Amino acid sequence: MDKRAGFSYEIQYTKAANKYLKTHEDVRTQYEDAIKKLLMGDHPEKVDVKRIKGKRNDYYRIRLGDCSVVYAIINGKIIVIRTLLAGARSDIYKKMSGLK
């Protein structure tokens, strides 16, 4: 958990996201840095993030080179970023159909 600018945030990972990111530590580091940039306002324009359209419009994706990471934000006193999926850009949207 990180505390800055008067609020806290925590990044949680589903099994699927954690499994991919364990074998791709460089992507995990890039992802966590991108989340910090977005939350702290530290050059957020450099982060390639978009809201996902359709039924999953409360999900977002961050593109990191050939990979994408799908996440959702849960608001409260602590901002929780729930990381749902991570993987190759070509496969990530196919995997989304299996999300609950």
Image (cartoon, rainbow, N blue to C red):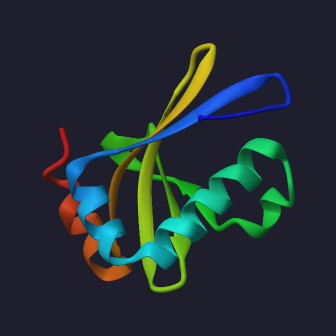
Which residue is at the front of the view, 51 or 61? 61
Q: Residue at x 31, y 41 (%)?
A: 55
Q: Quadrant of the C terminus?
A: top left
Q: Residue at x 63, y 14 (%)?
A: 77
* 46 up-or-down from 76: above or below: below
Which residue in the rendered view is the most extreme toward the bottom? 66
Please provide percent x and percent y for residue 95.
Answer: 20, 62
Q: Residue 7 at x, y = what percent?
A: 74, 24
> Could you tell whether 20 is left or right of 36 in the image?
left
55 lies left or right of 51? left
Q: On the rendered structure, is 4 left or right of 27?
A: right
Q: What residue is drawn where x is 30% and y is 58%? A: 17
Location of the N terminus (image quadrant): top right
Number of numbered discs present? 0
Q: Is residue 40 above or below residue 62?
A: above
Task: Indicate the position of residue 53 as horizontal and vertical percent values.
Answer: 43, 50
State the residue at coordinates (58%, 15%). 76
Q: Residue furthest left?
A: 98
